Amino acid sequence: MSDQDNSVNTNTRVLKTYQEARLQNIENLRKLVVDAAATLLQEEGPEAVTVRKVAQKMDCSTKIIYSLFVNKEGLAQQLYLEGCKLLANEFEGTPQAADPAQHLLNLGEAFWQFGQRYSSYYKLMFGGAFADFKPDEESMHGTVTAMRQLLTVVSNAQEQGLIPGQYDTESVVRIVWSSLHGVIHLYMGGHLGDVLSAHAVYKQTLSLIAGSLLPNHSA
């Protein structure tokens, strides 16, 4: 190997301290554990996500899981944040529409699809599937980030004078979110029949919300 090759290798080599390498390994291990827990969550439901079962899936001791996440709730928080990313992806893939009412309908449909496609995540995030888990500040920030497109649609409509100004943006979003969640939660509880019947109720609810907020822009 020439001196020039040695020089190139030396210049491009990334050196890490022991502490940096150790932290990277811990972070990689945390990700693997979260991936294992996410697989259990999707395949077997929230009740299957226990420290013991995750450890079995990882073929490691429960002590390792506890050392990384302290308890089951710490693991649930990471799954919550993963769910926020999935929800954000659903919203980002929503067709854009110039008409704000149609855009609201599109985002509402994306929320329904998220609940169907990732029902276990939905139950964890919004259905109280982990009784002892309560979203902390980081988790709530993740929710706000996931809901950013909905916040933007409502905010833009308010700035254009299309939505009456007696409510602030976050209050409007909470009203929309609560109403739609109510339908999904009732469906998951078996109160609205099969998925087609529940989806019909959901779309009617969504249409009523859009029509009430944007009476001159009914899609």
Image (spheres, rainbow, N blue to C red):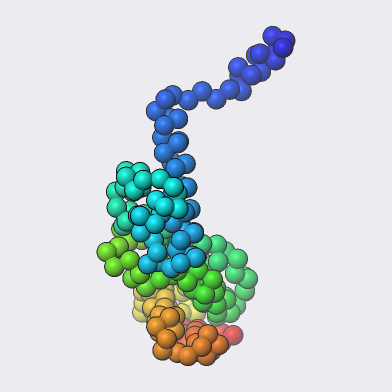
Farthest residue in the top direction?
A: 3
Query: Residue at 45% of width from left, 89% of height from top?
Result: 192
Instruction: Decide if residue 34 is in sight here.
Output: no
Left or right: where does residue 167 sit relative to residue 14?
left
Relative depth, front residue between 88 and 184: 184
Residue 66: horizontal and vertical position, in percent? 31, 47
Relative depth, front residue between 108 and 28: 28
Residue 60: horizontal and vertical position, in percent? 40, 45
Query: Residue at 41% of width from left, 89% of height from top?
Result: 191
Relative depth, front residue between 128 and 182: 128
Relative depth, front residue between 32 and 11: 32
Instruction: Decide if residue 54 is in sight here.
Output: yes
Farthest residue in the left direction?
A: 132
Residue 102: horizontal and vertical position, in percent? 58, 79
Instruction: Note whether 72 is above or below 152 in the view shown.
Output: above
Query: Residue at 37% of width from left, 67% of height from top?
Result: 47
Number of numbered callouts drawn: 0
Residue 109: horizontal and vertical position, in percent? 55, 77
Query: Residue at 39% of width from left, 28% of height from top?
Result: 19
Left or right: where does residue 14 sit relative to residue 212?
right
Farthest residue in the right direction?
A: 2
The C terminus appears in which quarter of the rendering? bottom right
The N terminus appears in which quarter of the rendering? top right
